[in-house]
Amino acid sequence: MSPSLDSPSALYHVLPNQDDLVNASQIELDGDSEEATVPTDPPPQLVDSRIRWIHFILGCSVLLPWNVVITAMPFFLSRLSGSPYRSTFASYLTTSFTAANFIFLAHATANSKNTSPSRQTRSSIIWLVILNFLLTLSTVFVPSPGIFFAFVLFNGAAQATVGAYLQTSVVAVASLFGPQAVQAMMSGQAAVAVAVSGVQVASAAASLWGKPRTYKGDGTAEERSAFTFFALSTLFLVVSWAAHTWMVRMPVYEHIAAPLERQKKKTIGEDAHVDERLGLISTGHGNSFAHEKANALRIAKLNISYEVAVAYVFMTTLAVFPPITTSIQPTNPATHPLLFSAIHFLVFNVGDFLGRYICSFPIFLIWSSKRLLTLSFARTLFIPLFLMCNVQGGSPTITYSPIISSDFLFMVILFAFGWSNGYISSLCMMAAPSLEHNPRLKGRVEDVDVAATVASFCLVAGLAAGSIASFAVKGVICGCNPFTNKHYELHRI
């Protein structure tokens, strides 16, 4: 008989060969089965490399919507050139995106036990394909600035909504495969940003080749660049859908994640003893939602240190990146602002990716919630550092002399900012749902996926809070109303 889930012996059991996996996948959770043993963190070297790569791809898909709309900022701004929407567009876009993601992630987290992860993942990816295709078409048609402004905000909010459900299902399944699968997913989120910003740098460099620094262009370079990575993102989403379909059909997926899938098929009229047979899952009784909500709140209190840490990481990041960092202009007169902005996205994303990647090496892992919380709060120091750089777009009556006038030093600071973002956030996401390294879970296997989704929810809460904070930071810089860009009659003494 399988060990009880409340027993310390209820650990991850790696099936020795493929035949055993096939046999295990054929065991149905019906009335003939007394217990369902749900595996916990597998040893890193025993996680199937195919599973890691697929979670890497799915991680790319989770953060692809965000990176597409952020990296396409030059294109959006070129379409809004000369309109009153341009100066505040970045803050409005990041705020509407993260707010929608936050709201619907709360709903997705509360209902994570009542939805099939595989079906939710597939339907979410299909919707993202449609929304990215619409963005691709937007590079062909030229509507009025007001209509374009509303379209981009609506499309971004829609992608954020769909992405919330995709993120919940991907994170829940990754947590069952252990920290290494979570790390692969987090690395994928950063890798897609590197790829997208790399395309942007290449297209910007090509469009400016041989042109003087004062060349402003007519927006065609931004259109070509946006069309390229909108189309590539749509194609990649189709590939990720195929990869996910392949993973769902694997015997190892049946062994690890099938209990989550089978639970959704239970009906209200089933016997109450089904709860005893499905250790990780809940039934569809009338009080199911209230029970899951109480369970999520309980785990949120247990993991509060990890959750505050990961939320503050992204709150700090979004307070200045990209609404403030895109307003920092090069001090070298030979550097074109368009190319400088594109490189700045790439530098941050490379740093973010490397920060997440080194979490795959045990020597760099930190599991202590107190240390992670301290590191997260320490990132506040980056905000005044950026404000010391060559920030432009302030009040026309006030001139600022940058304290940090080196473009290279700005890029070094930006790289460290991205690196710390990826490193600390990955550690928090890996530690929060880990039975081996998080003693607060007390070996409760049924809390693993909930802990992961709650941590993911707090991550997005940090994004939303940071986006709102960016308005305040912008107001300090420009001496204006950050929502309308109307300057106050202030004069420096």
Image (cartoon, rainbow, N blue to C red):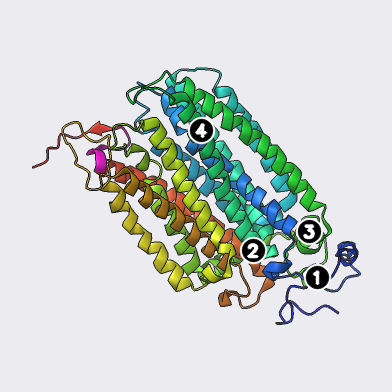
Q: Position of residue 241 (x, y in %)?
A: 72, 42
Q: CA distance from mark 2 to mark 3?
A: 15 Å
Does residue 291 appear in this view? no
Q: Identify which residue is drawn at 57% across, 37% down.
A: 158
Q: Position of residue 131 (x, y in %)?
A: 61, 32
| Residue underneath mark 4 | 202
Q: Quadrant of the C terminus?
A: top left
Q: Is residue 417 found inside the magenta-colored segment of the image?
A: no
| Residue underneath mark 2 | 180
Cβ atoms under marks 1 and 4 closer than 8 Å:
no
For disc 1, the neighbor class at 10 Å (few under 14, some 14 to 19, many from 20) is: many
Q: CA distance from mark 3 to mark 1?
A: 15 Å
Span colored in magenta: 477-484
Instruction: Name the amino acid, label 1.
Output: Ala
The mark lying in front, picked from 3 and 1, is: 3
Does residue 474 lie above or below 316 as drawn? above
Q: Identify which residue is drawn at 34% across, 31% down.
A: 87
| Residue underneath mark 1 | 36
Q: Left or right: 246 with respect to 331?
A: right
Instruction: Count all numbered tags in the image, as a single digit.
Output: 4
